[in-house]
Amino acid sequence: MTTMRRTTSIYVEKRDGRQETVHLDKITSRIAKLCYGLDMNYVEPLEITMKVVQGLYKGVSTVALDNLAAETAAYMTTRHPDYAILAARIAVSNLHKQTRKAFSDVMTDLYEHKRVTGEHAPMISKEVYDLILTNADRLNSAIVYDRDFSYTYFGFKTLERSYLLKINGRVAERPQHMLMRVAVGVHKEDINAAIETYNLMSERWFTHASPTLFNAGTCKPQMSSCFLLTMHDDSINGIFKTLWQCALISKSAGGIGLNAHCIRASGTMIAGTNGTSNGLIPMLRVYNNTARYVDQGGNKRPGAFAIYIEPWHADILEFLRLKRNTGSEEERARDLFYGLWIPDLFMERVKDDKDWSLMCPHKCPGLHDSYGEEFEKLYVKYEAEGRYKKRIKARALWEEIVTSQIETGTPYMLYKDACNRKSNQQNLGTIKCSNLCTEIVQYSSPDEVAVCNLASIALNRFVNEDKSFDYDKLHEITKVVTRNLNKIIDENYYPVEEAEISNKRHRPIGIGVQGLADAFMLMRYPFTSPEARNMNRRIFETIYHGALEASCELAEKYGSYETYEGSPVSRGVLQYEMWKTEDGKSVVPTEQWDWVILKEKIAKHGVRNSLLIAPMPTASTAQILGNNESIEPYTSNIYSRRVLSGDFQIVNPHLLKDLVERNLWNDNLKNRIIAQSGSIQGIAEIPKELQDLYKTVWEISQKDIIEMAADRGAFIDQSQSLNIHMAKPSYAMCTSMHFKGWKLGLKTGMYYLRTKPAVGAVQFTVDKTALRESNRANGSSLKAENQAAGVSCALDNEEEDPDRPSNEHFCVSGKVVDTTTSRVVARQVYRKATQSCETDTKRPKYVHNNMAASVSAELNELDRGYVDDLHAQVNAKLPRKVNSRRAFAYHNLKSFDVIRNPYESLPLDLQETLSPRPSNTGNPNNGNRWIIYQEREPTEEPMIILGRVFAMENIIAEQLMKAATMVEERLDQEIHDIQSLDEDGLEALRRKRLEEMKQKQTQKMEMMANGHGKYEEVPDERAFFDATKKSDRVVCHFYQESEMRCKVVHKHLQKLAAKYLSTRFISVNADKAKFLITRLNIRIIPTICIIVNQKTSDYIRVFEELGKSDDFKTEVLEARLGRTGVIDYEGVNAVTGMRGGDLRKGAIKGAKKIIRGPAKYDNNDSDASDDW
């Protein structure tokens, strides 16, 4: 008889309230039952059980146990994607045990829902509820619950967080219930169509947009995604009526695009008050706060407004700075999104380096109501009449645009003339803006709010097992989607009357795609290969033809849309006939579909919809279906994604399948891919054809991406959400990219400019030992470009042989380099990294993996606190002058020079600070010399690496061995102590660690609430005094807007603020702080004032101290701040012989003065507690 293993004294509370002793075999058995169809060579149920056991406590519920098991499996996704499937199955099974099975029963619960007061508050409409009860048997039997288990964990948690309806905060629906609710809510009495839609959605052929999934079948079924508004009028009534509309739409989960071209510029006369206008910026701050307050449907998604203006508006320069990270808060509105509606004339003037005139729409009416030749004539006329407010060089404005895009990713770029010339709504009037995501291009006016209903087709589902693509099935699904979206127009709830008027008159819809990259991978086509480009074009030709055909069939049955006459389609002109190729030729469709017959049918019956195709971002719905977003390439093959529903590890399943089939997948390879930020380029074991197939977007030419957008654009009658990715964008690169898109005739030139972070996240998942062994075996070096975000950075372990060459990766000043080099230099650098070993346990925590960043989602692991303690203890034994943020490094060294002063290129006062002081007699550091290792590669930027080589090598080796032995003995003892703990002891340790983690997180949140982690301007002197009282350490930059060099300081302090969370970084406009300027004796701008414990500690007169040049590096200012002790700096200052703690103590002792603010800022009656 088999004895079932159990954990003593720990019981679980089952869902029915009974208590039962925990049995490990039961947990393992439950997990194993859900592993059907998974690769058991990689998935280990017992290992998950053992990790789950670590989180057990008395009285834990089975629901919590399942959640913990699912989370544990999810965090193992980087081992194999099957863990994500297993995690989802555990979570889905858990939900199934908590919810009712029958669809009609769940809908009854939702309909009969009551508030706490007892008031009836149905969550679905009576009409839908009655239909469900009438057809209960048929609908219940149509549902296939096993399809819930096909979701990934990421997809399921996204559904659970925002999409499944809840009763009193508890999820009531299963995913299949939601899909059937949506299908019935869309089709109402047409049960056949509802079941067809349910099956296609549950089989993941397509999905409706998020607002449809949120609201279909409910009491207010607002199923539309996009709303485009025009400002009612340039008046108080018009501005706030428009704001009211925005609030109502956002409340109903709609995203908003608003054009503000008509708002008069700042300084323009207001006739009604004899005053002058404040312009766009103060108004937009009001809209910004509304977006923050009114989210999309009650905490489902943040409210989102995109504001569009044309570049001739006189407030354009201030508009471009609204999302910047620095500057006065009164001139920023960072929660809005911004887009430019660009006429061809502006692009021409930039190209020709001509002047550009900025105008006020009040003085120069009609500009936003015209396009093309009409606009150009009117604009030139106003210029000739001298009506402009300001004239600047077109390229000066262009530079501001590009600078903003590099810093914030916006503004969006849409080309006004292309959007109007190629629109089927051009007969309605001038189109003035796009939507939040730049794929919707529709006419709006004060009387009409443009609306669009969206759905996306999952392209990967159409790839057959024989690697063929089923275009006929795609055509069929497109027609179903078209019919569905037409039903939504008729059944929709409209938050404002103007939206209903517009949508029912013009009946636009937006059909998009997701999983294009997945489809290419399944077809074995590299993303930009000729085969992929041909398939890209054929896919959108098929979708456009299918949508037009279905729309024509609906028109035959119900009639064409109200404003059909006069549109290009009514004249026989389809979208592809409005496009030209790059060489000026007409676009000719393939012979796959009979366009002649279709045009004959349209001429006879018309079409039901004015617009049809609009590839949208599909951010959330692609997560749900487990596909890559929209038309995008993969950004990484392994990455972590943070969304509202949590943090998730994502692995490219197609790549992993290929690697497993070739018997290549192992932990070493996984670690190397993670170390390369999800890239597989340059890994010798991976075949070239796989490296080509699985290139990330950072390794694909953006020129090809833009050309593919133009290829498909000929069959897209709205527009497309086109992101541009540049790892390290520059002015020249961005300019070239924008002009390429404009010349190709794109409507949307750019949605977001996506860039790589300067510093990647900490990679706790990388096994450093395995990585080093793998690199050593291959003898290969990874290219720095592929490592720029998130490559592991660490010093060698103490135990390793100092005589071997090192292949470890290090960081110097944020640049990652590889360290394959000669045995001699490796030995020298290794010994430098192990000198001055001490046992001071008060050193800052040593993070093995990176230059310093936020701890990843793996902090949720129960043993993370203990591991951090061990890291800190090991770090305490490392050299005090070496740390992971500023590791000593070398890179393919050809030679090195011995010199006396490595700082001779720096300003004199910095040379004095950084030069080594004379050593005391008997100190083993006597006789040391400085060396510079300088890279000799002519094709790359020279890199200086500083290090010391000490003569006392034997003493250093002895110190190293002693320190390593001490560390090892202490760790062995701690491990022994933990292993000897009983269950209560382990529980106490676990709770202690969790409490420590909570305290750290609380401290971090408090600091962030006080403004730490960002660089921002304080509006007045009172705010300055408040900041210095709330924060022990403050860096304050006194600047003037007229002083251009202050922008350089802004840029550096912005970087440092994000890096040093414990210090508050602020700026003060010297023109608004006369008292402070006088009291602190600020005579030079820019000046940085250092405040420690509410006392001035030091002043940095930036350009006098750090050199006269504007191009000094952030690291130089960082080192100077480190001298003052205002930041927890362990870099260059360590070379002086002072530790961070000693440095800060010295800085505080040197505090210069205590300053008390003027009486009007003194909120404390006691002088004793008021240092300022």
Image (tube, grey):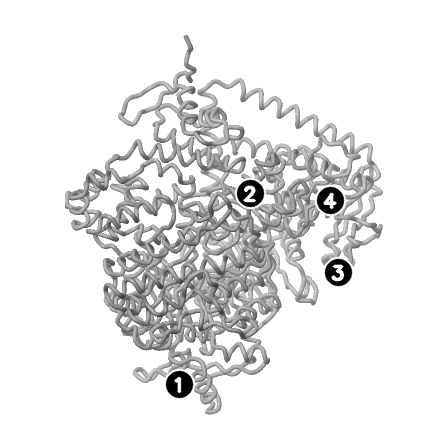
The label on residue 655 is 2
- State the quadrant of the N terminus: top left
For the residues marked 3 and 4, what is the alpha-carbon distance in whole angstroms?
A: 32 Å
- Residue type at mark 1 is Lys
Q: Residue at x 81, y 48 (%)?
A: 930
Q: Say whether marks 3 and 4 touch (CB < 8 Å).
A: no
Q: Are marks 2 and 1 in contact (CB under 8 Å)?
A: no
Q: Which residue is mark 1?
A: 363
Whether pointer 4 and pointer 2 mark residues with C-beta atoms closer than 8 Å, the reply is no
User: Is residue 721 shown left or right of residue 1057?
Assistant: left
Between the C-alphas of marks 3 and 2, the distance is 54 Å
Mark toward the viewer: 4 or 2: 2
Q: Say which amino acid is labelled 2.
A: Leu
Looking at the rendered structure, which numbered label has been put on residue 908?
A: 3
Mark 2 residue element = helix
The image quarter containing residue 99 is: top left
First in sequence, mark 2 or 1: give its number. 1
Q: Please name the residue shown 52% across and 33% down the image.
A: 865
- CB contact under 8 Å: marks 4 and 1: no
Query: Image quadrant of residue 168?
Result: top left
Q: Amino acid at mark 4?
A: Thr
In the foreground, 697 or 135? 135
Residue marked by disc 4: 819
* Viewer-nearest of discs 3 and 1: 1
Circle 4: is it few (<14), some (14-19), or many (20+) Cα within 10 Å? many
Structural distance between the alpha carbons of marks 2 and 1: 59 Å
Position in image of residue 267 (x %, y %): 42, 80
Indicate whether 669 appears above or below 1051: above
Q: Nearer the viewer, mark 2 or mark 1?
A: 2
The alpha-carbon separation of the residues under discs 4 and 2 comes to: 28 Å
> Gap in Å between the C-alphas at discs 3 and 1?
56 Å
